[in-house]
């Protein structure tokens, strides 16, 4: 039998589904059937709860609208893995009683796939940025000195500045912290870089010979010395 409201509903190009408060489908547009890959006429009289159990779509918006008595929007997945943005709207009678739930949807599969792709892309970008930060700030190499911290970067920057000053520099630090490397770095960046860099391990020189090694001596100055004398390390 021809029905005016049914004819109007079927002429809609958009998805539109109407259920009663028991979740029984009373109206479904032609587009609704196309979205769920079924004949819309076959949906009439069926329960949305049963259709969810059968796997046609999930979750269902109807019970949420009934509970909240207000407009609800959610993302629904069909049995064909389509993603739908479903909105359910409550319809009340003049007494304020809920009588119908009208829902409509838009397919957003491509949009969600794009969103997921962008999220993965953003994560990849953040990962690459982190790796670049590590390479830039945590693993730097300058003149053979490899360092991993911002504090060491400050030491290198300070050493480069003091290298430009013609003054005596005292480096303090425990054994093994790299004083010799910093001293060589300063020498290589100073105006004396063309001259030799003399490294002296003072701890390995006996106290009795310290002055002779550092400042040199004349021939025969002490037993076992070079008859011709020797230039001190400070004179090289």
Image: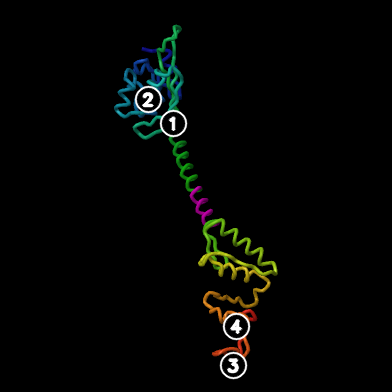
| Camera-side mark, 3 or 2 | 3
Q: Earlier in the sequence, mark 1 or mark 4?
A: 1
Q: Quadrant of residue 166?
A: bottom right
Q: Which residue is mark 3?
A: 227
Q: Which residue is mark 2?
A: 60
Residue 125: give its label.
Answer: none
Marks 1 and 2, how far apart at CA: 15 Å
Q: Earlier in the sequence, mark 1 or mark 3?
A: 1
Place of residue 154 in the rendered image (x, y in percent of width and height, measured from the top left): 60, 58
The one nearer the camera, 136 or 112, is 136
Q: Which residue is mark 4?
A: 212
Q: Which residue is mark 1?
A: 107
What is the image's colouring?
A: rainbow
Q: CB under 8 Å between callouts 3 and 4? A: no
Q: Quadrant of residue 141?
A: bottom right
Q: Earlier in the sequence, mark 3 or mark 4?
A: 4
Q: Which region is colored magenta?
A: 126-136
| Camera-side mark, 1 or 4 | 4
Report the quarter where the N terminus lies: top left
């Amino acid at each position: 039998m021809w029905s005016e409201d049914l004819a109007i509903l079927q002429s809609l190009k958009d998805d539109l589904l109407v259920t009663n408060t028991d979740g029984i489908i009373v109206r479904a547009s032609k587009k609704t059937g196309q979205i769920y890959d079924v004949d819309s006429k076959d949906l009439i009289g069926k329960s949305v709860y049963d259709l969810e159990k059968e796997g046609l779509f999930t979750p269902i918006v109807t019970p949420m609208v009934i509970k909240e008595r207000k407009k609800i929007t959610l993302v629904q997945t069909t049995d064909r893995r389509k993603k739908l943005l479903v909105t359910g709207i409550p319809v009340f009678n003049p007494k304020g009683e809920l009588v119908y739930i009208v829902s409509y949807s838009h397919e957003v599969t491509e949009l969600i796939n794009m969103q997921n792709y962008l999220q993965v892309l953003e994560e990849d970008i953040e990962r690459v940025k982190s790796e670049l930060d590590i390479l830039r700030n945590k693993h730097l190499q300058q003149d053979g000195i490899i360092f991993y911290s911002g504090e060491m970067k400050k030491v290198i920057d300070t050493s480069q500045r003091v290298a430009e000053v013609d003054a005596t520099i005292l480096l303090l630090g425990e054994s093994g912290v790299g004083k010799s490397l910093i001293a060589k770095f300063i020498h290589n960046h100073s105006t004396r870089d063309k001259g030799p860099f003399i490294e002296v391990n003072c701890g390995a020189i006996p106290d009795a010979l310290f002055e002779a090694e550092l400042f040199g001596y004349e021939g025969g100055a002490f037993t076992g010395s070079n008859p011709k004398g020797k230039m001190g390390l400070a004179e090289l």
